[in-house]
Image (cartoon, rainbow, N blue to C red):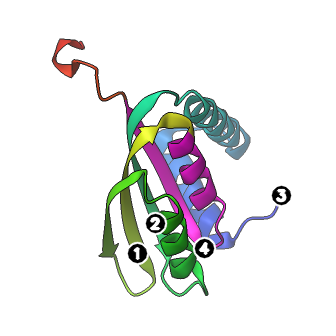
């Protein structure tokens, strides 16, 4: 496996701060977390309100157009979006969706697969849950 040196350096800094005994141990945990997140995303079913947060490279050719096209293609799901310029290279996009959980998950996975997208997180809730009663 090959990784950019800046990514590996940052990973090494974090694993040292967290007290891992080796990079292999930290990679096993990172892979487990990735698998858990993937499995959790596959359980997003039924009516949901979702938020997709993503950070992407501003200068990646065609990426902004691809993101706009995805949002237009799913206009029935998307209720709002916010675009924030983080710095000269990076943008933050927050997309709020309401509808079928499977469709929301598919939008998130489509965004994840785009070249130049650095981070994607999907959070989804059922709109009918009484959250005041949760522990």
| Rendered residue at 47%/49% (across/down) | 121
Q: Which residue is mark 4?
A: 116
Q: Which residue is mark 1?
A: 91
Which callout, 3 or 2, points to the residue nearer the camera? 2
Q: Nearer the viewer, residue 109 or 56?
A: 109
Q: CA distance from mark 4 to mark 2?
A: 9 Å
- Among numbered discs 3 and 2, the one appearing first in the sequence: 3
Q: CA distance from mark 3 to mark 4?
A: 19 Å
Secondary structure under badge 1? strand
* Image quarter of the N terminus: bottom right
Q: Which residues are magenta?
A: 103-125
| Rendered residue at 47%/65% (across/down) | 71
Disc 3 to disc 4: CB gap under 8 Å = no
Q: CA distance from mark 3 to mark 1?
A: 28 Å
Q: CA distance from mark 1 to mark 4?
A: 11 Å
Residue located farthest toward the right when viewing the structure as drawn: 1
Quarter of the image where one finds residue 21: top right
Disc 1 to disc 4: CB gap under 8 Å = no
> With respect to residue 49, does 46 lie above or below?
above
Residue 53 forms part of the magenta stretch: no
Q: Nearer the viewer, residue 46 or 30?
A: 46
Which callout, 3 or 4, points to the residue nearer the camera? 4
Q: Which residue is mark 2?
A: 55
Few, some or many C-alpha atoms within 10 Å of disc 1 (few <14, some 14-19, many ≥20)? some
Q: Position of residue 40 (x, y in %)?
A: 56, 30
């Amino acid at each position: 496996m090959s990784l950019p040196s800046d990514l590996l350096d940052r990973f090494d800094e974090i694993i040292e701060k967290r007290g891992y005994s080796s990079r292999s141990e930290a990679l096993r945990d990172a892979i487990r977390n990735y698998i858990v997140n993937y499995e959790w995303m596959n359980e997003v079913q039924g009516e949901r309100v979702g938020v997709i947060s993503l950070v992407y490279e501003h200068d990646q050719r065609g990426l902004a157009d691809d993101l706009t096209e995805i949002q237009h293609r799913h206009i029935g799901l998307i209720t709002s979006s916010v675009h924030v310029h983080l710095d000269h290279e990076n943008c933050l996009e927050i997309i709020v969706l309401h509808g079928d959980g499977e469709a929301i998950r598919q939008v998130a996975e489509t965004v994840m697969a785009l070249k130049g997208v650095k981070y994607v997180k999907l959070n989804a809730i059922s709109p009918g849950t009484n959250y005041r009663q949760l522990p």
